[in-house]
Image (spheres, helix red, strand yellow):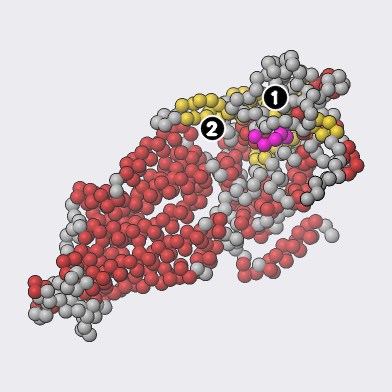
Amino acid sequence: MTDNDILVEVRDLKVHFPIKRGVLFDRTIGHVKAVDGVDLRIPRGQTYGLVGESGCGKSTLGRALLQLTPPTGGEVVFDDVELTTLPPARLRAMRRRMQMIFQDPMSSLDPRQNVESILTEGLQTHGIGGNRDERRAIIGEALDKVGLPRWALSRYPHEFSGGQRQRIGIARAVVLGPELIVADEPVSALDVSIQAQVVNLLDELQESLGLTYLVIAHDLAVVRHISDIVGVMYLGALVEEAPSDRLYTEPLHPYTRALMSAVPVPDPDVEDRRERILLAGDLPSPANPPAGCRFHTRCPWAQPTRCADERPVLRDIGGSRVACHWAERIASGELRPRHAGVGVTQASDGAAAPA
Amino acid sequence: MTMTGKKERLDRLAELVNRDDERGVSLWQEAFRRLRRNPAAIIGAVILTVFVLVALVGPFFVPYEPKDTIGIREGVVKSGQGIIPGASVEHWFGYDHQGRDVFSRMIVGARQTLLVGVVATLIGLAVGALIGGVAGAAAGLGGRWGRAVDNALMRVIDMMLALPSLLLAVSIAALLGASLSTVMIAVGMVSVPVFARLLRVSMIAQANSDYVLAATSLGVRKPKIALTHIVPNSLAPVIVQATLTLATAIIEAAALSFLGLGNPDTAQPEWGVMLADAQPYLGIRPALAIFPAVAIIITALGFTLLGEAMREALDPKLRK
């Protein structure tokens, strides 16, 4: 893979939000490190899936990548253009090439705009289509692409169902002819039956328009289906990144293993016997992350040396990138997990105490 | 069957179904539909229609000249001796202390009362919306400098809020000298902080919404986002507040007139002035105070009913 094939490259991206206190004057008493040093590359025409539990910074990363949240540090290179230092006017012009799809289709559509006005806004901003008729033609095409009828144009968002609203949101992103689309939880607000339709629509659009996606989700099944590469985030940083199939069959980082073991298997016999890793405790505060490896406080494989004082960097291990000091020795089975919560869970037949 | 064929058939079917519903229904249209079904809104609207009609055309149909002291000329009214005749066939609401026809004065007074209420509210709305709009846009989209602008504007508003409203109105009236426009400005300025705060908070809430982020990611300029997305979505509570303010503006204008800070031409009928004039004669003929008081209450009630109904109709949480 040559460098020309990389559409987006993120280097050491940081987004820190100040925590302010004070009666008369605000004092900054600390920072929430929502994103704290992320490196990733998204190849052109592919889908990068970003997973992690809520609060791990994956949405903030998506917004910082599009410069919707100003990054505290690091670089975002989009098609050889560094975005973080771009003057506002040029950044606005660049926005045509990178769009966003939101989680909640209702709140991401202005309730007072009809569909025509929603879809025209971007075209007008970037001066695409000279007059109303030309713009209508472009909009009509976008509606066809996302599978909405023409009569939708004069309707308002509250007159549509959830799935249709998400299609309007997708049409708004697609109508500008972007190269990159950041989809922040694109299906998690939808019914399961509609989720599949929208995921398939995203797939079709990628094929016909050659789009590059960054899909942010917490649903592991959706991410596996849609992604070529998957990155796992924990507390503001990537812990593992691998081609989709490889990550799901051969997770290397202890956190990824725990995530994968939470996915139920649709076979009752296997489901009863399979290994489940239960993580103890909660996600530590991103305002005060643990020293060393961010995950060592909850890691069943945590070792007395290195883990607590040396922050692991992403290393190449057979095609995956993993941020764990002991990944090889965990994979080979040399190191054993030590928590009581780990192991084979038995199917209990629910012996309820008699009254 | 190809995909496009199916799509065309669906479109045609939808056109048939929606023949008389070609256009989509905007939020305002839907709010108006709900308003029509609300009895409180209808009662409020009826009261206000009657009030506005009386104010507009009433003065052309009054039986007597409202400033004419007929009662004294004819010798029927001797207020010094406590003789003020009450209602009769010729004078439906009786005479006032200067022998003028109260019914005619009530009708003619409606116009000035309405004028003061509407103009005062408009002044408050315009100034308040301007301050609140600038502060809201600055706080919502302007970054650090925006927050500084917002802070400065809001401290001024806080100072205005700290003064009791009648005291503020009296101070302004005293500063400008008694006149009709003074009353309007004074009453209007009192409602400025309410409008400013309301619009600002509402705009800040909208500025954090996803559709503003979506517009930003489309590349729309911030001032345009503020004007085309944030302001229209923040106006509903402000409009409701305006109808409610109309009610209090009429009462506050009456209070200023009562204190002698209103129109210097005291012969010109206005409900607040009439209420003030009736005070010394409460013992002899309380009706002189009751007529304007009831008229003010009913009008304020009309505005309040309509305002509350509008608040309900525009509340997104109550929408099905």
For the view shown, which residue lies furthest in the top direction?
A305
- Quarter of the figure that contains the N terminus of chain B: bottom right
Q: Nearer the viewer, mark 2 or mark 1?
A: 1
- The structure residue drawn at horizontal position 86% and vertical position 41%, both measured from the top left corner, is A347
Q: Earlier in the sequence, mark 2 or mark 1?
A: 2
Q: Label 1 marks which chain's residue?
A: A
Q: Residues within 10 Å of mark 2 (few under 14, many from 20)?
A: few
Distance between mark 2 and mark 1 Cα atoms: 42 Å
For the view shown, which residue lies furthest in the right direction?
A269
Tell me which amino acid carries mark 1: Thr
Picture coordinates of residue A241 (x, y %)? 76, 28
Tell me which amino acid carries mark 2: Pro
Picture coordinates of residue B140 (x, y %)? 49, 40
Residue at the disc numbered 2 = A88
Q: Is residue A125 above or below residue A84?
A: below
For the view shown, which residue lies furthest in the front direction?
A355
- The structure residue drawn at horizontal position 62% and vertical position 39%, both measured from the top left corner, is A96
Q: Label 2 marks which chain's residue?
A: A
Q: Is residue B271 above or below residue A136?
A: below
- Left or right of B15: which side holds B94? left
Picture coordinates of residue B264 (x, y %)? 17, 60
- Quarter of the figure that contains the C terminus of chain B: bottom right
Q: Main secondary structure of the magenta part?
A: loop
Q: Residues within 10 Å of mark 1 (few under 14, many from 20)?
A: some
Residue B234 located within the stretch drawn in magenta: no
Residue at the disc numbered 1 = A297
Span highlighted in magenta in the image: A50-55
